[in-house]
Image (tube, rainbow, N blue to C red):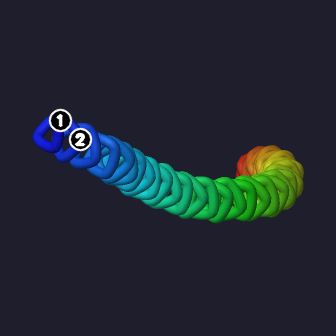
Amino acid sequence: TPAVDEETRHSAVAAPAAAATSGQSEAERLRLELSAIQDALARSQADVSALGAAVEDLRADKERQAEQHVALEKQAAHHEAQAQRAQARLAEAEETARAAQQAKRDAEARAAALEV
């Protein structure tokens, strides 16, 4: 019948059109998904780059701290040597003071003996 033929022809045209629309929707969905994945990848790459820079900064800080530590150890060794030299000079000065005190007592004793 002509009505059935018209309906069949309409279905035959509508089905591929619906499939094409469905395929286009799927392709668009996949494009959006791919775009989101690419955005996430770009953010991840930026994060990796920032973390790499932070690691390099930390390594540089560690190296500076190690250099400062070595400098402080050298300074401490220098101060220790100065303290030892000062201690030796103090011991010499104390010995000289004792000897001078003894010489003073000896001189006073001789002077007292001469006065008698």
**Of residues 99 and 91, the one drawn nearer to the viewer in this rendering:** 91
Q: Residue 5 carries which label?
A: 2
**Quadrant in which the N terminus appears:** top left
Which residue is at a point 53% across and 62% down the rendered structure image?
42
Secondary element under disc 2, as helix, strand or loop, is helix
**Of residues 80 and 98, the one drawn nearer to the viewer in this rendering:** 80
Within the image, what quadrant is residue 28 found in?
A: bottom left
Residue 115 percent across, percent down from the top left: 72, 54
In-image side of 61 versus 82 (left or right): left
Q: Can residue 7 be seen in this view?
A: yes
Q: Residue 1 carries which label?
A: 1
Asked if 1 appears above or below 37 in the picture, the reply is: above
Secondary element under disc 1, as helix, strand or loop, is loop
In-image side of 93 versus 7 (left or right): right
Within the image, what quadrant is residue 7 found in?
A: top left
Which residue is at a point 28% across and 47% down the rendered structure image?
9
Q: Could you tell me the amino acid type at mark 2?
A: Asp
Which residue is at a point 79% across and 59% down the rendered structure image?
63
**Of residues 39 and 87, the one drawn nearer to the viewer in this rendering:** 39
